[in-house]
Image (cartoon, helix red, strand yellow):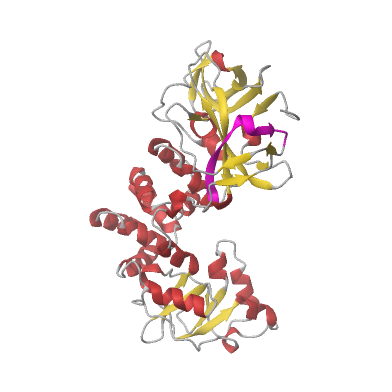
Amino acid sequence: MSATPSRIFLSRIVGQAVFDPAGDQVGKLRDVVVAVRSDRKRPRVLGLVVEVLGRRRVFLPITRVTSLDTGQVITTGVMNVRKFQKRSTETLAIHELLDRTVTLADARRGIVYDLSMEQDSRRDWFITHVAVHESGKRFRRRGPNHVLEWGDVSGLTTEESGQGATHLLATMDEMRPADLANALLDLQPKRRTEVAAELGDDRLADLLEELPDAIQVEILGVLDPERAADVLEEMDPDDAADLLGELPPTTSEELLQLMEPEDADDVRRLLVYEDRTAGGMMTTEPVILPPDATLAEALARVREQEIGPALASTVYVCRPPIETPTGRFLGVVHFQALLREPPSTLVGALADNDIEWPRPDASLEVVASLLASYDMVALPVVDDNAHLLGVVTIDDVLDHLLPEDWRERGDLGAREVATGG
């Protein structure tokens, strides 16, 4: 193996791009698979977990890695893209060993914040060192840092009941919610809930929206009810309604009572609709403006960071009140129209309202056909009196059209990816 430093700390390579010999990126490094034998014997590095196209995580044997130079990982040969399934004898170094509480040789305690790997003379890779924050004394929050040989600490081979996730999450700071959700799917339920518990409310809300229903319920079930309600408030109302619909009615009502009344009201309105209907799929928080708002105001709204691309594609023009359910719905203004006219133009002058918009009981098939027929990524849902009730976005439609287990499968429709060789 060439161009490889003698000691590599895992926190420095997790998230790095993985390239084939021709320089084409084939994925990102997400973890290191090791065989932990005992507190005294250094774990052998078996391979890497690489996230390839479609968020599928696959196993790359360490023997197929030709370089682990700073900033990139280079592989050769053919990468098998069967989904990675961890065996009972394997350990994910990043996801399972970081944040472990360990005992140092002199009985002091500490928290693992990094690990390093090295290659021996036979070109085999091993985890050789453990970086530890020593537990502080008295009023010190944290003691000194140590980089110790694997055999000089104990506690890495046994299950820990209350393992934290601070340092693991530090390696995931830049992950999109969908990628973070994919990472958590590979973890055992205990570790998954430990990670979720340390996320902020908004980050956890984004994560839950990307997870399968059963795991959403699993995570929400271990949270204190007050915190669970706070997280539900941060979720899009349609996603919060879907999650509450998976819970027992008494639990769902308890959480609704703990939510802020305005947020709870939005969710309650959505809970009355059937799942595979426009009402059951819609969100109640699109970009809504009165007809006398200017295009400059509209552009300022769609630029807001918390508004996703599908919702930012269209402005909905309504008479007051402009919270759903609104006053009379006057039409839509697509993002391109906002860019074509002078900023002082009123949105009411550009509102397009020549389509028969779906009612809340419209079926999934009707909504999908309307999106396809008119090349739209979001669609208003109105009642019989032309009040805007909400908006269905294309991602919500796809969630219902794809197989139920599509998040877990990460199918690519292929068995292997050629990476040279």
Choose between 16 and 173: the one closer to the eye.
Answer: 16
Q: Position of residue 148 (x, y in %)?
A: 60, 17
Choose between 249 and 344: the one closer to the eye.
Answer: 249
| Side of 292 where 344 appears, left or right | right
Q: Hey, which residue is sitting farthest left in the picture? A: 250
Where is the C terminus found, in terms of image quarters? top right
Residue 172 in view here = no
Q: Is residue 151 magenta?
A: no
Q: Position of residue 340 (x, y in %)?
A: 69, 81
Choose between 35 and 142: the one closer to the eye.
Answer: 35
Give the residue drawn at x 35%, y 50%.
Answer: 214
Q: Hey, which residue is sitting farthest top in the picture? A: 106
Q: Is residue 58 magenta?
A: yes
Q: Position of residue 402 (x, y in %)?
A: 43, 61
Q: Is residue 308 above or below residue 172?
A: below
**Looking at the rendering, which quadrant does residue 12 occupy?**
top right
Choose between 351 and 74: the one closer to the eye.
Answer: 74
| Side of 42 where 7 appears, left or right | right
The magenta stretch is 55-70
